[in-house]
Amino acid sequence: MNEQAHDEARTAPGDPLVQGERLDLAAIRTRLEQARGDGFWRSLDEIADTHEFQEFMRKEFPRQAAPLESSLDRRAFLKLLGASMALAGLSACARPPAPHQQIVPYVRQPEQIVPGRPQFYATAVVTGGYAEGVLAESHQGRPTRVEGNPDHPASLGAAAPTTSATVLSLYDPDRSQAVLERGNGRSWDQLISALRSALEDSSDGSGVALLTETVTSPTLALQLRRLLSAYPALRWHQWDALHADAVVAASRLAFGEDVAPVYDFAAADIVFSLDADFTNRGPGRLRYARDFARRRRVRSADDDMNRLWQVESTPSPTGSVADHRLALAPADVAALAAWVAGELGVAGAPAATLPERVAPTWAQALVDDLREHAGRSLVLAGLDQDPAVHALAHAINDALGNVGATVRYIASPEAQPAVHAQSLAELAEAMHAGAIGTLIVIGANPVYSAPAALRFDAALEHVALSAHLGHGFDETAALATWHAPLAHVLETWGDARAFDGSVTITQPLFAPFYGGRSELELLAGLLGDAQTDPYEIVRAAWEARVEGDFGAFWQRSLFRGVVDGSAAPERSVSLQALDVELPARADLVLHLVPDPSLGDGRHANNGWLQELPRPFTKLTWDNAAIMAPTTAEALGVSKEDRLALTTADGSVTLPVWVQPGQAPGVISAWLGHGRRRAGRVGNGVGVDLAPVRPRAGAVTRVTAAGRERGRHRLATTQPHHNLDGTGERRHIVRAGTLAELRAEPDHPSFVHPFVHHESDIFPPWPYTSYKWGMVIDMTVCTGCNACVTACQSENNIPIVGKQQVLVGREMHWIRVDAYHRGGIDDPDFYHMPMACQHCEQAPCEPVCPVAATVHDHEGLNVMVYNRCVGTRYCANNCPYKVRRFNYLQYAELSTDATELSLANNPDVTVRSRGVMEKCTYCTQRITTARIQAGNEGRRIVDGEVVPACESACPTEAIVFGDLNDEQSRVSEAKRSVLDYALLEELNTQPRTTYLARVGNPHPAVPENGRS
Amino acid sequence: MPTSVNAVETNRVLGPGQTPASIDDTVNTPVLAGLDRTPLWWWIGFAISAALLGLYLVSVVRLVTVGTGIFGNNMPVAWAMPIINFVWWIGIGHAGTLISAALLLFRQPWRTSINRFAEAMTIFAVVCAGLYPILHLGRPWVFYWLLPYPNTFGLFPQFRSPLAWDLFAISAYATVSLVFWYIGLIPDLATLRDSARNRFQKLLYGVLSLGWTGSARGWTRYMRAYLILAALSFPLVLSVHSTIALDFAVSVVPGWNNTIMPPYFVAGAVFAGFAMVLILAIPLRRAFHLRSVITMRHLDNAAKLLLGTGMIVVYGYAIELFMAWYSGVEFEVYMAYNRVFGADHWWAFWLLIACNFVAIQPLWFRRVRQSPLALFVIGVIVSIGMWLERFVIIVVSLTKDFLLSSWFNYVPTFWDWALFIGSFGLFGTLFFAFLRLLPLVATSEMKEMAHHDAQHGSDHFEHIRGEYYGEGGRA
């Protein structure tokens, strides 16, 4: 280490280390010298924990050390203080240093890096192989937050919950940290040479298999093609537990080639979704959600709306905003698709009768609607549907002339489109047969996620040399002979395609925190390339592809987060004669759905996602057998009973959840639970569904279902959903139809069921600078939870664990209240995002005896944590119940591993136990903007302050801004006749108001879909 | 000890034939007795109380080290057992001051023999009560931020909050009650000093009696001071519980936001206080052979007050439900429905009605009022009922307020019960120490009454009255 530079950095004025006489600088220096490489700044933190340092702290800052003597408070404080020390180490992390290279702390401050001011880098988070562009926020080299990239076609600025939560996974201390051979530490080079020699021994690659997940990365595809040409007998298999196999199969079925459909919801007036949760699942979800929502945004009677017809087996966020939603079993969905195809004159449509649950008037209205809007309609099938349904959807779109208008086809963005279930089954078969001597698994975790029927774990025993490159030491890693840590997407270079083929070159924000390696490095090693640096690999791959000024191309691509003009061109396809067979009906089927938060289980060790209340059920920390009330009645079970389900493949026992709006005869259960080696958070949460997972598809027949002894408590954050009865009379959710709005365009009675006069004996407070406010549009909110996780990440909100959720102490500042109304079979669903309403007459403020919650000069209801003594009176008096109390030292739960605290936003206080907290309208962002605007001598402009929830929202349901600015989006939204204040009769005058939900049901079926 | 006289049940305020000497004998002898003469029941009671106090301390240590989360509170039920217990104890603490101050001002002579221990009960109950609001804070160690003291934060309490009013109401009440009690004790302490049997007693009572000589001038000043303090503390009886009622009435929570809360809480407090007076007086008069000092007349009067205040409280329940319906506000209507028929807590409401309404109805009958056992049982039932009343008001209202999404149930934990049961230990320990060290009856006032009887023929009056109504006649 450079002693000179080190000393200079240390002796900078204001450094607390030098001011104390008792601190042994020499000892610390010795410790610093021992700490090297990527572990460097964690070691600094350890130093901060020495006795001497704590003594020093105690003397220097007695108030901070004194009050609690709880280890966490002191440590949390020390960590904050340690951060100033740590800057030196962090700066080294900002560039990718190899271990044992010389690292140098800042002597002169680098350009652009201003302590306290974050930087944003455009990159992408890869979900199911597909890129969703993000902007990653970095505080002095420490990534703390990931938001959507407005320039990226798959994001447009939105971010799914898993994307926001990825920073927590990044620092997860349970991530794998070392190369291991049967549990013994090895070096990366030893792994590469072991694999190289296996490849060379086979000469042509026979007996060697490679198992990857979905590959869209052009660079990785290039490497794979090189590897396959060097070793032609090498087998490349793919397994992504949630891969859209049906889309690939249907493309081959309908067009005889591998194409991918890309939908244009902006052009669709009528959408008929066959079990497609298109706003929430699949590669284009965020983009589709935005385009779809923009066609639904209603502010006045003059606005127009699209119409969504949705049939689905289990309530989905997309289905919940549908104008006509019908719960149908998967086989009935297929039958309806065939019937509609037949009615529309699709050639070769299989004969089908209308399913029992579909009323003829309903179906006729649907067909009429589609026919009337030919060329402006869109039919799409869900990922869990049979390929036949997808093929029918393609055919219907073709018949309606929608191809080229609302749907276009492109060459599949995947490097090698494949039916993954089939690919994995072939691999497992070959392994069982002893045909595979060497298996290299990249990223995938088949031992956990494969159907148990394939017996992948047993198959692995037949493989002499198996290597696993993964984020964690997971179920597959435990059985493989070799394991190496895989770098996180924020840690290494790479590239990936989005749903429309656009490429993002992903750039790292810092060196691999736990020593992970990129798959590009592994492939380069297998190829025997001299250049194994991912940066050089990616750069070289693009240098070969780009003509002209490469430097400018590189700069621009990285800066924007998307490669210009890389979207795939439309491809003309020709529909083949339809020859499809409809899936058979069954009395009781099990529908395996990816967990709305955890996906296939790869996020199981992420506490934010485990504790994220799933849409509709608001269930956390568990999966369940979700069934309709009629199904539960038929099976003789009720909520929280344990139900054993047997299928042809095996059986599982799940707790029962009764869900209105679920299709009768369909039990839905979430994949991604019951992990055995996910880590300390995710192990043993929920039930693993691998035993009943069918070899292909997501639906399987239940042969036997029986109640088991005992009950299993499910932790839900909202026990009451039904708006009928008292809920109806409370006017919480106000909903009507476009026709009702047009009948009363100036004062729609469904928005204002009663007259309320605001009154106050004091004159209103004059807001002379800014006056912040928010509007939430209930018409487009799908309840997807993007806002919840974004808020959690932005505001350092702790998780509390299942036990604390069970006693009602979850801490989310924003929650999505789920309501339903109407019959239990096909109720209407409503989502109401609920955070602090920042009431002008806030009931919480006058009751606080210590003035810990007060109004500020810009209208915010602010919470002064340091002043709060914890009487909790404010929470009692809050009619919206948005206040959250630290009953225990919850922050400890997410920071007991020091590493996780790195994901904290340094602009937001970490709260200690005993204080109240709540939504601040992201006051730290307002302050940042205010300072910036102040420096530039101007006012904050509209859109400059975007709270985390608004920024993440895929449907732009949340609008925030300055009410003093007549032109602002929020002022405009508040002028809408649909605007109403929740519980306005209490005269709280909330600053957050709601736009009443407007539905657009077909005139022929008005009774259904009063959404 | 003149047990023959004291063993007789009487409806007189003071048993017949009582002299200053006999009163001293009855009251002071057990106080001045040596350790070896301390009765076994005292040791047992004190030991149990001390054990419960231990539980209380363990709970407090756990609370401070782990956090408020050891209780069952959640969102939306941010206030639960600690606040219920607080209101319950402070309610109990009402009877003492009412007896000493209000009845003194209204010249009700029957207060004299029960005021001392009732005041002690008040102070100890206020101690138990006052600790809860501090302990239930998220950060109890900074409770003093509620006090208006000059500080470097430049911050003052937020005086619009009822919790700030609360603090002053309780501390004023505790202070005045303590001073009033102590002033009342001074002549008795001097008596004890004068007949002290050992150095410890001499020192203790000598210091505490503040050099009381019993001079006529002393007495004049004393009586005036006592009366002024009584006049000062009487409004407090009304204000303390009114203020505590405002904690709820000021809020927007359906079930809390009622203007009837203050008077109804005061009535409830007197009701609970007299129930506790009965619970304590009935065993005490037996253990200390005080039947002719705390007579049936006292029990009968207390029972009548119990009945009267109880009916006011029942009227309160009825009005709450009526107003909820009459308001036409959906939230209020549902609150009333949920309170009475709601699936989760209907039992609490009906149990409360059983305890506070049905159980006191026998008090209309003189025979019941004349039965110490029946009164004791009713006192216990009413105490349970009053606890349930606070449970229904505080917890049941919070579980289901405005937004359906935020409805959530409340389940108390082991530590909730530990801190509650432990508080009996705190109360018991203080009370048993009081029984052993101080006279539980105001002997100077009793002597005055005995003297008055002897000089002015109250005996004669009582005799005539007895002939007219019979010895069991109306008191």
Image (cartoon, coloured by chain):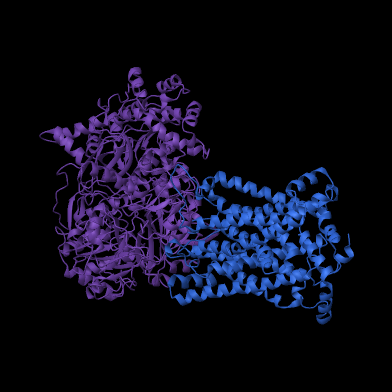
Decide: is B470 above or below B171.
below
Can see residue B359? Answer: no
Q: Residue at 40% x, 43% y: name it.
A: A909
Q: Colour of chain A?
A: purple
Decide: is B24 above or below A207.
below
Outermost residue on the front side: it is B217
Decide: is A409 above or below B245.
above
Residue A622: horizontal and vertical position, in percent? 45, 53
Q: Colour of chain B?
A: blue
Residue A151: horizontal and vertical position, in percent? 20, 46
Decide: is A837 above or below A111.
below
Q: Tell me the quarter of the image containing the C terminus of chain A.
A: bottom left
In this rendering, position of residue B191 left or right of residue B268 = right
Residue B100: horizontal and vertical position, in percent? 68, 63
Q: Tell me the quarter of the image containing the N terminus of chain A.
A: top left
Can see residue A522? Answer: yes
Query: How many marks overall?
Result: 0
Would you identify the image quadrant in which residue A376 lies? bottom left
Residue B441: horizontal and vertical position, in percent? 76, 60
Outermost residue on the left side: it is A548
Would you identify the image quadrant in which residue B133 lies? bottom right
Give the camera-side residue of A485 and A987.
A987
Give the camera-side residue of B272 and A690.
B272
